[in-house]
Image: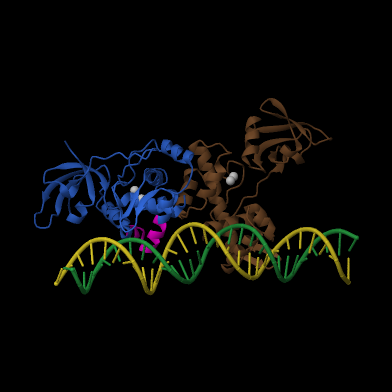
Chain colours: A brown, B blue, C yellow, D green
Amino acid sequence: MTRSEENYLKAIFHLSNNGVGVVATNAIADQMDTKASSVTDMVKRLSEKDLVKYIKYKGVELTAPGKLHAAKVIRKHRLWEVFLVEKLHFNWDEVHEVAEQLEHIKSEKLVEELDSFLEYPKVDPHGDPIPDKHGNIQKLDKVLLASCKAEESGVFVGVENSSSEFLQYLDKLKLSLGDIIEIIEKEAFDNSMQIRVNQEQINISALTANNIYIKKNK
Amino acid sequence: MTRSEENYLKAIFHLSNNGVGVVATNAIADQMDTKASSVTDMVKRLSEKDLVKYIKYKGVELTAPGKLHAAKVIRKHRLWEVFLVEKLHFNWDEVHEVAEQLEHIKSEKLVEELDSFLEYPKVDPHGDPIPDKHGNIQKLDKVLLASCKAEESGVFVGVENSSSEFLQYLDKLKLSLGDIIEIIEKEAFDNSMQIRVNQEQINISALTANNIYIKKNK
DNA sequence: ACAAATTTTTAGATTTGCCTAAAAATAATT
DNA sequence: AATTATTTTTAGGCAAATCTAAAAATTTGT
Ligand SMILES: [Mn+2]
Ligand SMILES: [Mn+2]
Ligand SMILES: [Mn+2]
Ligand SMILES: [Mn+2]
């Protein structure tokens, strides 16, 4: 399995609902920053190897082995992200690029020992769940902050967008995973929110609220 | 810099005296388990990029940037080997294959943080010196056990051959880096040796003694 | 239902890295 | 010095992964 094949599987996994559902050629091309014709080529190869089910003009879907392999790559990606943050002083906005490389290292023992060394983390530094070695992903009990009403509260448990720009903006707001967020007021006009976090009140845009997941209290 | 280019630089580095001296095409082909024609191809590419000095039919030599890059790859290889043994319970005969992959991960921060996390090790699990970030390699004060005479002694500090077969044989003999070795007797007929290590006496062949480095006492 | 717009596939090229077989250069032997 | 053997390079080809441009299929809009 080549690095490129693994990257395609991962992209298809993310674009489908964690591997359930058909994905369009252009969607993959956009996600991977490549051309539709390259996607068609690769999808044919993956289909040869029974990693995807491909129907011309209809789209592509992961098979069971394809789904398992994708989940394993994502497992490695997220475990390495935890390692970088917990052990090597990386900030959460610095880990993705390096994890993109580390996720392709092939060694069962390495993954399992790393998992143990990190004490079996359940989520990565962005709050995304870490698949187990069989490819099963825990579904997390979280909702978009934007979907909540005034006076509701919860714990900041994840981000929808993990671009370094957004993560750095959250750093600037001193908003970190684990923080308790209370919604003071929600502005009907533009859906911006006044929230309290760490004894401070701040105002965030609807766009920001749409990229923050909380686990609701009660 | 591609993975393949890095592997060639590393091979040339090892075949020359850590980057000083000319290496033959066939020597590289043997080391890398490939064909001489492939080596010629690659050596031309490396020469284009000024990583080697190549003279047709005469051989190839690392330039200063080529030498630096090779040393950096070797630095990463050896740091990762330390990580695998010290933190992830790998045995010294299991690390090489994985380190061959990890040595190509590109991130200055990763290397330097890893070095710090491991508390700046000087040698890898096989006793080989770890280059510093500028590519400088400490020359170690060690000699082949085979070159020593009866009644001499020293500390086991490295292996010449780090194949898993040899390392597993040493495990079987309960010989580990750091052990004190005393030469009891050296057999003139076949240069085998009777040695004492960990209060036990064992007999080792000349071939074995030729793959063990010690730091002489006194 | 048909034309227009969009999506997807095919055709043909390019680059990297490798191969085999043949030719050229160098080294070793008589 | 000439022949033989060895080493190295060249020539030509192949597979993976990408691209551009053109053709084909599907979807959308009237
Ligand atoms: Mn990531
Ligand atoms: Mn992540
Ligand atoms: Mn090694
Ligand atoms: Mn080593």
Is residue B39 covered in magenta? Answer: yes
- What is the quadrant of residue B198 in the picture? top left
- What is the quadrant of residue A182 in the picture? top right
Q: Position of residue B155 (x, y in %)?
A: 22, 41
Is residue B8 covered in magenta? Answer: no
Task: Please report the bounds of the magenta region as a residue range.
Answer: B28-43
Q: In this image, B32 relative to B175: left or right? A: right
Q: Quadrant of the C terminus of chain B?
A: top left
Q: How many marks?
A: 0
Kindly tell me whether residue B100 is visible in this rendering.
no
Q: Position of residue B77 (x, y in %)?
A: 39, 47
Q: Position of residue A9 (x, y in %)?
A: 59, 58
Residue lying at the far left in this picture: please name it.
Answer: B188
Q: Residue drawn 56% across and 67% down?
A: A49
Q: Position of residue D6 (x, y in %)?
A: 26, 66
Whether D1 is drawn above or below A211: the answer is below
Q: Residue drawn 32% across and 40% down?
A: B137
Pick whichever, A90 or B94, lies toward us: A90
Pick whichever, B58 or D19, lies toward us: B58
Q: In this image, B167 relative to C28: left or right? A: right
Residue lying at the far top in this picture: please name it.
Answer: A199
Q: Residue drawn 64% across and 38% down?
A: A165
Kindly tell me whether residue A169 is visible in this rendering.
yes
Q: In this image, A93 relative to B185: left or right? A: right
Q: In this image, B129 relative to B150: left or right? A: right
Dominant secondary structure, magenta: helix
Pick whichever, B179 or B59, lies toward us: B59
